[in-house]
């Protein structure tokens, strides 16, 4: 991701940064019905696997379907707690640079103070 690609967006009284992503979802030559559905969903959200949106009530939406990570559910964080550490290294490095760490047992990031980022108010203070 290049900083010059980060944009500012707004939606229904919310505003913040967003990144359209570079890794596009590509429909295979012989797609399954699930892949066809995914292509329709991704088309409405830009279709990038690495997209990030921080300008709506979800606070943190990610990926091709812009999956909402708003506390208390934190769907994306919960998925992070199930994936291989090597696959997450770019995300974890980005967080470490800013003083955050991922708490795998809780399935949430923890702040500089060690407290979990598990409320909308705490999520909005992450930078």
Image (cartoon, rainbow, N blue to C red):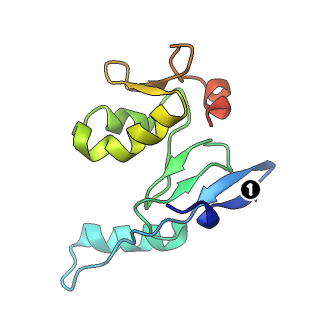
Residue 65 sits above or below residue 44 on the image: above
Q: Percent from the top left, x then y, of residue 41?
A: 44, 67
Q: Secondary structure at mark 1?
A: strand
| Residue at the right extreme of this rendering | 13
Q: Percent from the top left, x then y, of residue 64?
A: 43, 62
Q: In the picture provided, is 99 more to the left or to the right than 35?
A: right
Q: Percent from the top left, x then y, of residue 61?
A: 53, 48
Q: Percent from the top left, x then y, of residue 66?
A: 50, 55
Residue at the image position 32 percent from the left and 24 percent from the top:
104
Residue under circle 1?
Answer: 11
Specify few, some or many for label 1: CA neighbours under 10 Å numbering under 14, 14-19, or 20 or more. few
Q: Identify the image quadrant of the C terminus.
A: top right
Residue in front for this viewpoint, 114 or 20:
114
The quarter holding residue 4 reads: bottom right
Residue 123 sits above or below residue 42 on the image: above
Residue at the image position 25 percent from the left and 37 percent from the top:
85
Residue 68 sits above or below residue 63 on the image: above
Residue at the image position 50 percent from the left and 18 percent from the top:
116
Residue in front for this viewpoint, 38 or 8:
8
Residue 66 sits above or below residue 33 on the image: above
């Amino acid at each position: 991701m290049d900083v010059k690609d980060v944009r500012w967006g707004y939606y229904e009284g919310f505003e913040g940064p967003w990144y359209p992503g570079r890794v596009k979802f590509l429909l295979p030559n012989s797609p399954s019905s699930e892949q066809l559905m995914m292509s329709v969903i991704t088309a409405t959200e830009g279709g990038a696997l690495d997209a990030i949106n921080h300008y709506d009530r979800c606070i943190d939406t990610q990926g091709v379907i812009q999956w909402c990570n708003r506390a208390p559910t934190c769907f994306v964080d919960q998925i992070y707690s199930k994936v291989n550490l090597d696959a997450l290294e770019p995300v974890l490095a980005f967080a470490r640079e800013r003083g955050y760490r991922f708490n795998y047992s809780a399935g949430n990031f923890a702040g500089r103070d060690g407290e979990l980022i598990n409320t909308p108010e705490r999520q909005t203070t992450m930078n």
